[in-house]
Image: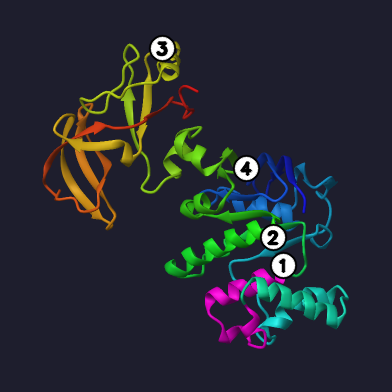
Amino acid sequence: MAEVRYEGASRIYPGTEIAAVDRLDLDIADGELLVLVGPSGSGKSTALRMLAGLETVNMGSIHIGSVDVTLKPPQDRDIAMVFQNYALYPSMTVAENMGFALKQAGVSKDQRAIQVREAARILDLEPYLDRKPKNLSGGQRQRVAMGRAIVRSPQVFLMDEPLSNLDAKLRVQTRTELADLQARLDVTTVYVTHDQVEAMTMGHRVAVLKDGQLQQVDTPKTLYSRPANRFVAGFIGSPAMNIVEVESTGGSLSLGSTSPVLTPDVASDLEKRGNDVYALGVRPEHLILGADGTPGEVTVVEELGSESFVHVSIDHQKATQTVVVRAEGETEIRRGDKVSIAFNGPTHIFASNGERVGA
């Protein structure tokens, strides 16, 4: 096991001047499960492939433990990678697939069998060791791919969207199993996904990327409650944070006819910045429907059983704005109802450049 460190690492593909990964500085602790997340084209998979040695590092360096691996070939980095397409050999049994890398490394047949059986025990694959991949379910195939990585006892696991080919129910089950497995093995793991729910439920920390640049890296709780900028605020959370443009006059802001209570640090920062156009962010669970507040009309009600999300159209600064409010699951509210919305929790203010206002 070992820590991983990116130091100003950049990847610029031939034929373009724009970096796919731009001066990435990131420290990953020994035994940590760090998730790289971001929209398509954010650079998350490129960053993973740079660590694996599958992409050239044009500037900066990458370290595994105390070793600079920037120029080392993939086979000399002591890493194991799990891909989204499993990459299993169809003509081999589960046991042969799991032990293939060990065979290539010259490990004896008896020792291979011991290591394969131990990995199979951890992954609950012992009954399937003699089967071919075509006779396994998607979840079982993914566990075989994991087993192939485990038997090598690498310093670092790299996982590139390993659950994207699974159906929704199996995906939830398997991500729980993966998180539990990583905790038991205590191996440094870098996990790439475009699914922010997957990122928030699995990662010890989550690194959010956009256009090749690191936006914020922190615990899921901190990313959710104190996003560093407007992009992170809108990307993290499902449904997304409500974000509306507001004008500050004398340090006051409002959503429709209702104003949030600002913390002292935000109020002080707003006063220093002066009058300008800002973005006011508030999560659906921090708004309530009641008698007092900004009036509006319900346009959509999403009923999810344990909760409902009510879309409300309001008049805001001489325009129509839709905001989403979380309500109890068995709400009686219906499309076309006249309601009022009010603040019931923290709000977030972002400057015109996207950065967070206040500490």
Tell whether label 4 touches label 2 (CB within 8 Å): no
SS assignment at label 3: helix
Within 10 angstroms of label 3, few (less than 14), some, or many (20 or more) residues? Answer: some
Q: Amino acid at mark 1?
A: Ile
Q: Is residue 185 magenta?
A: no
Tell whether label 2 touches label 1 (CB within 8 Å): yes
Check the picture and name the quadrant holding the N terminus: bottom right
Q: Determine which residue is flagged by label 4.
A: 18
Q: Determine which residue is flagged by label 3.
A: 271
Image position of 266 with respect to 297: above or below? above
Q: Position of residue 306 (x, y in %)?
A: 29, 55
- The answer to whether residue 55 is visible is no
First in sequence, mark 3 or 1: give its number: 1
Write the residue at 64% across / 56% down: 183
First in sequence, mark 2 or 3: give its number: 2
The picture quadrant where one finds residue 319 is top left
Q: Amino acid at mark 3?
A: Glu
SS assignment at label 2: helix
First in sequence, mark 4 or 3: give its number: 4
- The answer to whether residue 7 is visible is yes
Q: Determine which residue is flagged by label 2.
A: 185
Q: Position of residue 92 (x, y in %)?
A: 70, 85
Q: Which mark is residue 87?
A: none
Q: Determine which residue is flagged by label 1.
A: 150
Residues in magenta, as a range: 125-148
Q: Is residue 135 magenta?
A: yes
First in sequence, mark 1 or 2: give its number: 1
